[in-house]
Each structure stands twice: as structure tokens, then as C-alpha cells.
Amino acid sequence: MKIISGLGQRIGNYAKIHKNDKAAAGRFSRAFLEVMRIRRVLRFQWCCLTYPVEPKMVVFEAFLGNSYACSPKAVYERMLEDERYQDYRFIWIVHNVNHFAFLKNNPRTAVVKKLSRRYYKCCARAKYWVNNATLNDALKPRKDQVVIQTWHGTPLKRLGCDIESGDDAQYTKEQNQKRYKEHMDKLTYFLSPSAFASEKFCSAFCMKEAGKEHIIRETGYPRNDFLYRYTQEDVKRIRERLQVPEDKKVILYAPTWRDNQFGTYVKNNKERTGYLYTMGLDLKKLVEDLGPEYVILVRVHVNVRDAQGIPDDPQIIDVTDVPDINELYVISDMQITDYSSTLFDYANLKRPMLFYMYDLEEYAGKLRGFYLDLEELPGPIIQKEEDLAAGIKDLAAHFTYDEKYQAFNQKYNYLDGPDCSKRVLDELMPVESEPSRPNPWYRAMGLIRKTVEQIVRTLKRGRRWVKFAIPAIGRGMGICVSDNSKKLKSYQNKYRGKRCFLVGNGPSLTTEDLDMIADEYSFGCNMIYKVFEQTRWRPSFHCMVDVMFGRELAEEFAEHVKNDFFTSIVTYRQMPVKPEHTTYAYGYQKKDYTVSRNFLSYYIPSGSTVMTYMIELAMFMGFQEIYLIGVDCTSSLAKDGHCIPNYASPKVAENDLNRIRKRLNDPTLTMDDVAQYYQDRSMFCYRQLKSAADKKGVQIYNATRGGMLEVYPRRTLEEVLENK
């Protein structure tokens, strides 16, 4: 599989090289995707060969691993409540494990990254797969596995094989038919909320052609249980979390996606492709027309990767990232949608709905078409934007749950209620009463698998030894091969017996301090170049090791840093543009900070700061006396944490905050909390450095005006400069 992965990567790189030749790039891109698909298939089949199916293990996945919501969530939570399943194990498949770490609070639940090795292992072992969208094309369930497709809505617009008006942006009609037939072959059950939906699913997903009409089970949708079970305490809690004032009328705007709106967009400074969506109305004008008593919640479809047209306004709240749309249903007084299946779910609440179909002719004639007569919809249809505000006010003033609305629910939602999840469990997931017998085959294959894995681990350790340890030992012995290692070695003990000043970014630092050390050897760090216009001081050496700075501010460093620039190899590789005189220290990741025994051999960046890097580098260069100024042990990105006002852009500060939030798995952290985190981490590192410096006979002093760094002896800057 490693060979296949490498081959796929080479094909992908070749496609990038030939990106201007669209035909060649397309051929190689398709070849790359096929190679990676084969790799996924082999990985899953290997797991099937070496692991038995576990009768009391369930895998859940919602919206292709992007969410914890919908019917998989409802079935999972009902299983947690049901004593019959108290010894079952549950696996949630997600793309971002950190975002769903709260699921681990249940000791029987694991959160697994999609497409990881463990993902294939769990899918091979679990008896039940509960999913609400298409399955990974590499997965083919075994005979004793049960795949429950819950789907995610009653169809208003045509689906899959029933789309006759044209191709969507990604697949032709023939490709869609092939995809759905292959998907149906994998399913054991397909949930349906009504006889109407069953008929349409059978047609849309080519069930008859696949011989799978019998898999449909009319159970109602488990995800709608909450709409019958929620309490006013739930409503209050949700409104408080979303900061929706109690005195406001809430409108939920939930449009669907458009098949023909597919293209490129930029996220995290990278160009990506996916479904786009441009709002078909001016939301800001709408709230102005409605008045201050209204709040609009905007929820774009889960398929949309880039939504444009959501203004920054206190009356408009973007709730796209709220995982469970049920929470938005129960706090809203009215829903506006277009062709989204959310209309069927929302109808369970018997609240007013309005249908804003600004592109009705195009959608019906060129994109999808519909399964039902739009006259059946339980609310007015508006096509012109200028009529929308008046339509909302009129509906709010005169709404009744009339015969038309009742007939709609009796036809499309008659199975929904508070216990659809229980119905699914009772009918489709019976409790295993007898333990399964161990299979000798899997016992033998388990031994083989463990042996192979041990061999692979040994080879990887050997590879790491060859890649990292041997070159490090060579550099430590003075055997420097690369230009960078030769350049790094040229600094070793170059300034033996001299003194230097290490300049931090703390708020106590002044330009007068910098002017005082203008003729001394000094080290500057990060974006200290922003003070160059106010002082004649320039650092002898400039250091930066933060990967985020290297990735996002590389052009700034290349423009402003003209002296010797030092970084780590990890950051160096992330910099698209490098300063002219750049030297990097080698290293590997390690959880706990450790002072390097030989800076030439290796450097460990994990847990360190740019100041600890500068201290180690100064000791490597042979400086005997090291003075720290501007080291207040604050985060330079926090408020009042830097000597330069507006030191970092809001974007950089926000990215750093989000990075630490993910690292510590705490989305509530503030920038001041991050400053405390950096302070605690720095103090540990400084104590390590004090011990290492004492052993080498190097004197480190704290010449900072203020701050709380008491690890090193205090000296005033004036006192130091008087004694040359």
C-alpha cells in the first residue's frame, strides 16, 4: 500500500507540472484518483481478512463525516439510553477529531478520523453501519454486516437517476446512475418516512435495477424525534448559546444548494473546489424592511463549501456551523426555504413556512424538477425579492394550521413522532443474545497481522534512524555535508567569550533600550522589524520559529530581514519565500522540551518559544554572557502584550487563538488565556535552560524592565552597559 500511495503521489505531482495542459492534467488526475481508490480498497480488504465482525459494535457517520447530527445522532443517543445496548461499543467517523472530542465523554464511544487506518479497521469490525449519505467507495460490507442508510430528508426536488433536465456540475447522468447502483448493492436497509418517499427513493436510486426494492423500511425519520420531545428549557438553552434575544421573532432561512454552482474558492490561503452558493436576496435590506423585532438565522446547505452574501449585521446570524438543524427549527417562529427537504421536517412543528423561489423556472426546467405539485406546499410561494418582506409580515399575522397544511402532514409526515429511533432499533438492530464463537481463522490471521505490524514498526524505526539519527551524529562529529549544515557549523563558538543581548517583544521594551544596545551583538525575533523606523538599532541575528508566522508572513520577513536569519527546519519548510541569509537548525518533534546537547546535531522545537531558541543558539555561538531584555513572559498577540501597538494583524491573532484552542481542545479560550498558556510553557523551558547554562558556565541575566521572569538574576540595562 505504501508503494501504491507513492505511485499515486507521483501521478498527482505530474498532473500539477502539466496543469496548463488540461487534457494531460485531467488524465493524470483521474489516474491518481484511481490509484488512491485501489489503495483504500486494499486497506479495507486487509482489515476484513484479519479481523472478525464484532456483533456489538456500531459505526456512525453523518454527512460524509462532517457532522454529528441527523438520524445517525438520534439512533446513537437512543441506544445510549436503552439498557439493552449497555454493553455495545460505538464509533463516530468524522474528519476533524478535535471538533467532536466531546463524544469521548461516553466511555463506550470512540471518535475516529475518516480515511485513517483505524477507520478501515473499525468499518471492517462493526456489525452495524449507520449512515445518512453515500458510503466510501472502498467499503464493501461483509455478509454478516448490516448497513442502515437513514438518508436525510423527504425529496421535493428530483434525485439521482430521476434527474432528467441535465447533468450536475460533477457527474453526468450515466455516472450518477452507476454510482447509485453501486451504493444500493452495499445497503441492507433504507429508511423512509412515508409511502410517497419510498416510491421516489426506489426510482431515484435505481433500486429496482439493482434488485433492492425490498430494503426500504417505512419507520419515519429518527432525526425528527426531537421535534416531538424538546422542552422549553431546550429552547431557552439554544437561544442563549446562539445569542438570540428573547424578545425577537426568529426566521430561519435555509436554502438548498444548486447543482450548477460548483467552482473554486480560497480557504486558509489555499485554493479549493466545491459547491458554492450566492444568496438570492439582499439579507441586509430584508431585515431593514422587516424592522428591529426580527432576527434571521441563515443556514446554507451542508454541501456548500463557500457561501457568499451573508452580511455582518446584528439581526443576521450565520448558523451554518450549528451541527444539528433541529435546534434551529425549535427556536424559530417561521421558516423560509426554497426546494430544501427541510420543509418536510419543519412541517412537523405546524409553524408558518414561506417558499422563496427566485429561480423557479431555471431550477425546475434546467437543474432538477420536482416530485410533487408545488401547490401542495403548506405556505405561499414568492418569486420576487421586493415582495418578500410583505409576505413574511402577512403570513405572521394571518397564519393558521389549515386543512391544506394538515393534508400535507398526513401525506408526507404521518410516520414521524417521538419514537422513530426506537422503532428502528426494535425492527432493524436486534440485541445479540448469545456471544459469538471465536473463529480459528481470525486467531491465526491476528497473529500474522501482529507480526507484520511489528516488522513494519521496526522498519519505520530503522528508517527514522537513517533519516534523522545518523545525519545528526555525523553533524555532531563535524561531518557536515549539506550547505546548510556547513553554514550552521561556521557559527559554532564563533563568538566565544563575548556577550550578547536577546530582545523579546514584551511591553516593557522601549526604543531607548534598543538605541542603547545598537553597537552590541544582539538577537531580534519575530516581527521586531516593525520598530526599525523608530530606532537606529538593528539586530545582528534575527530568529523566528513559529510555523504560523513562517507560513503567513514569509513575504514580510523576506522584505524586512536583511541580516543573518535563523529558524528551525520545520518552519523553514513552511515558508514559501525565505530571507536571503537563512540558516535553519535541524530537529524532530518531541512532546516535552529538552535543551539540545549539541545544537549542530539536533534541535527540538516542540514546547519551545522563539526566546528559548535564541538562548540555545547564543550558547552554541559561544557567547559567555547573555542578557534578556523585553522578556515579560507575555503573548505578543494578546492585548497590551507587545511593545508595538497593533503588533499583529487581527487575522494572525485569531489564527493563533484558534490554533491553541484546538491544541488544548477548549473552544472557550480567550487571547488572555493563550497568554497565560505561553507564560506557563515558557517558565518550564527557562528553568531547563538555566540548568544547561550553569553546566556550560554560561551566565544568563534578566535585564528586562519589569515582567516576572525570576529564573535568572536581575541586572539593569544601564548597569550592564557601564561594565564593558
Image (tube, rainbow, N blue to C red):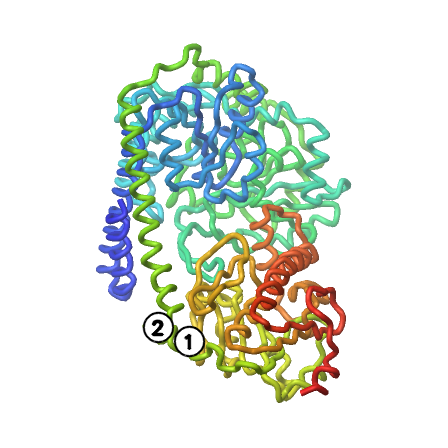
Q: Position of residue 282 (x, y in %)?
A: 59, 54
Displayed quadrant of residue 451: top left
Q: Label 2, on which residue?
A: 480
Distance from Cα at disc 1 to Cα at disc 2: 8 Å
Q: Is residue 146 above or below residue 650?
A: above
Q: Label 1, on which residue?
A: 489
Task: Specify the amino acid type for callout 2.
Answer: Cys
| Mark 2 crowd level (few <14, some 14–19, many ≥20, 10 Å Cα) | some
Residue depicted at 46% across the width and 79% down the height: 491
Label 1 element class: helix
Residue depicted at 34% across the width and 47% down the height: 170
Q: Position of residue 447 (x, y in %)?
A: 30, 29
Residue depicted at 56% across the width and 50% down the height: 663
Q: Position of residue 289 (x, y in %)?
A: 69, 51
Quadrant in which the N terminus appears: top left
Q: Nearer the viewer, residue 165 or 623?
A: 623
Q: Nearer the viewer, residue 646 or 301?
A: 646
Quadrant in which the C terminus appears: bottom right
Does the CB distance between marks 1 and 2 fall below 8 Å? yes
Label 2 element class: loop
Residue depicted at 53% across the width and 81% down the height: 496
User: In the rendered view, does 569 fall on the left or right side of 24?
Assistant: right
Q: Is residue 438 above or below residue 295?
A: above
Residue located farthest toward the top when viewing the structure as drawn: 433
Q: Earlier in the sequence, mark 1 or mark 2?
A: 2
Q: Nearer the viewer, residue 101 or 390?
A: 101
Q: Position of residue 112 (x, y in %)?
A: 45, 38
| Mark 1 crowd level (few <14, some 14–19, many ≥20, 10 Å Cα) | many
Task: Specify the amino acid type for callout 1.
Answer: Lys
User: In the rendered view, does 532 fall on the left or right side of 397?
Assistant: left
